[in-house]
């Protein structure tokens, strides 16, 4: 018998780690070639890890909810015959030397830290910590004693990334996370009425975690994706001072053109053309005119992006949101953009996106008009510095200037809302950029060939 070390596979150039969300096979199970061993999650994308060999699963090296790095040994499979790499006896891989990665948690460096703690020796703790948790703790100068005191939500009470980030955020706000964890668990039985009265105000501290006295309320635990979204939104608002500029655009020509070509386009390309690829094209053109909107911030450094990778926010059937990325959007024509938009949208709704397809965006577009909203104030998708929301297209009376004087006509109007990071994007740049996007939409050629 030989033993095969199953490694966490590489899932894309910008994906360095994944969370184990479910073990499909358990120790002792027989495994056929290409059988799914476990399910993993990277950001908001779930994937399956198949077995490259046939045999029997001997050991799982990561528990559910633990984070593994690409290349880590995640399982041991016993095979018949053949040589295999030597197997480490440790249950979990030792912490690697912390390296600087592009996916280091954005915004963490913005949080104030206390006095630096000495180098932490994790070997002295009886608790397991993943490499990512260790790296965050080292970056934030959190001592081992502090880590041991934080309640974990992972398997067997293990501390995961979300637990640690919540603790850091609460610590920064001057409130301990243990207040929330106490509320989320049923209160202990009390021996007398005075004790019950004394504890009652503490239960009401966190209204979102308080059970209803009448029993009519329902407590819903956030799923993994909603927790990620919540953390990302809070981090974005604490990192970037948000400013939003608004422009109303007359998109009558654009609407009439699409109505004219949509049937012939669908017959020719077997694809439906929506307004989204038109918006993406206008944004890509405006970014080329104002490249300083296509940047990110690293401390005091402004990183100007070479590529124009536009993320498009897509609502999932679960109600959660995911942002697949159209890479090099400026290099695609309208047909190419239409195919890319439709492909990503369909696969997003069917949970078929690849992990790398939600990474590397430099600017985000969200369509609040699809929900009937006329405008919105979107939150920046970190580490980007701007996000554009397009509202619903409504018929309105508008004043038109003609050679014979001003007239009132029924026009197709929509609002554009640009939220931007005021640390690096001033009102002049933000205002001119969103105005330029509107100009491209308003000047649409009714005779354009596609």
Image (cartoon, rainbow, N blue to C red):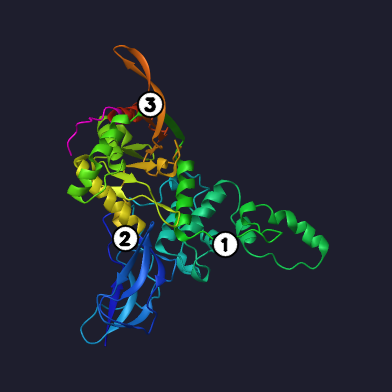
One can see residue 1 in this view: yes
Write down the quadrant of residue 404 in the picture: top left
Q: Nearer the viewer, mark 1 or mark 3?
A: 3
Write down the quadrant of residue 32 in the picture: bottom left
Residue in view at x 31 percent, y 67 percent = 8
User: Would you name the residue on which mark 3 appears?
Assistant: 410
Q: Looking at the picture, tell me which residue is in the foreground, 313 or 441.
A: 441
Say whether disc 3 or disc 2 marks the residue closer to the N-terminus. Answer: 2
Q: Looking at the figure, which quarter contains the C terminus?
A: top left
Residue 270 placed where, x, y %?
A: 21, 51
> Pointers 3 and 2 in contact (CB under 8 A)?
no
The correct choice, above or below, for 165 with respect to 446 in the image is: below
The correct choice, above or below, for 28 with respect to 394 in the image is: below
User: Would you name the residue on which mark 1 appears?
Assistant: 149
Residue in view at x 55 percent, y 47 percent = 172
Q: Looking at the picture, tell me which residue is in the foreground, 113 or 237.
A: 237
Q: Looking at the figure, which quarter contains the N terminus?
A: bottom left
Magenta residues, start to end: 441-450
User: Would you name the residue on which mark 2 appears?
Assistant: 352
Q: Secondary structure at mark 3?
A: strand
> Pointers 1 and 3 in contact (CB under 8 A)?
no
């Amino acid at each position: 018998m030989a033993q095969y070390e199953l490694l966490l596979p590489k899932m894309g150039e910008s994906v360095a780690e994944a969370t184990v969300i479910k073990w499909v096979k358990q120790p002792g199970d027989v495994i056929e070639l290409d059988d799914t061993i476990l399910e993993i999650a990277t950001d908001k994308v779930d994937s399956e890890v198949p077995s490259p060999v046939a045999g029997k699963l001997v050991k799982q090296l990561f528990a559910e909810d633990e984070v593994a790095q690409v290349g880590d040994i995640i399982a041991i499979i016993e095979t018949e015959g053949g040589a295999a790499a030597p197997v480490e006896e440790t249950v979990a891989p030792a912490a690697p030397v912390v390296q600087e990665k592009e996916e280091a948690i954005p915004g963490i460096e913005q949080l104030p830290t206390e006095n630096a703690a000495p180098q932490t020796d994790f070997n002295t703790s009886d608790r397991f910590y993943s490499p990512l948790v260790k790296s965050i703790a080292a970056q934030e100068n959190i001592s081992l004693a502090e880590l041991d005191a934080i309640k974990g939500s992972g398997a067997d009470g293990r501390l995961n990334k979300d637990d640690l980030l919540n603790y850091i955020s609460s610590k920064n706000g001057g409130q301990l996370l243990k207040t929330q964890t106490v509320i989320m668990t049923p209160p202990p039985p009390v021996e007398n009425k005075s004790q019950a009265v004394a504890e009652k105000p503490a239960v009401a501290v966190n209204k979102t975690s308080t059970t209803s006295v009448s029993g009519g309320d329902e407590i819903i635990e956030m799923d993994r994706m909603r927790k990620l979204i919540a953390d990302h939104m809070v981090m974005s608002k604490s990192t970037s001072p948000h400013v939003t500029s608004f422009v109303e655009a007359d998109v009558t020509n654009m609407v009439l053109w699409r109505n004219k070509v949509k049937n012939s386009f669908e017959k020719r390309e077997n694809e439906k053309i929506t307004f989204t690829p038109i918006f993406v094209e206008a944004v890509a053109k405006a970014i080329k005119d104002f490249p300083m909107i296509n940047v990110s911030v690293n401390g005091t450094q402004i990183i100007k992006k070479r590529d124009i990778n536009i993320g498009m926010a897509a609502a999932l059937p679960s109600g959660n949101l995911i942002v697949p990325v159209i890479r090099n959007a400026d290099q695609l024509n309208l047909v190419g953009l239409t195919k890319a938009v439709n492909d990503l949208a369909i696969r997003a709704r069917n949970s078929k996106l690849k992990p790398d397809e939600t990474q590397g965006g430099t600017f985000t577009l969200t369509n609040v008009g699809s929900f009937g909203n006329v405008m919105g104030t979107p939150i920046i998708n970190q580490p980007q510095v701007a996000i554009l929301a397009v509202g619903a297209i409504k018929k309105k009376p508008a004043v038109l200037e003609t050679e014979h004087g001003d007239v009132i006509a029924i026009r197709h109007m929509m609002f554009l809302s640009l939220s931007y990071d005021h640390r690096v994007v001033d009102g002049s740049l933000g205002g001119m950029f969103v105005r330029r996007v509107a100009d491209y939409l308003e000047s649409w050629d009714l005779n354009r060939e596609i």
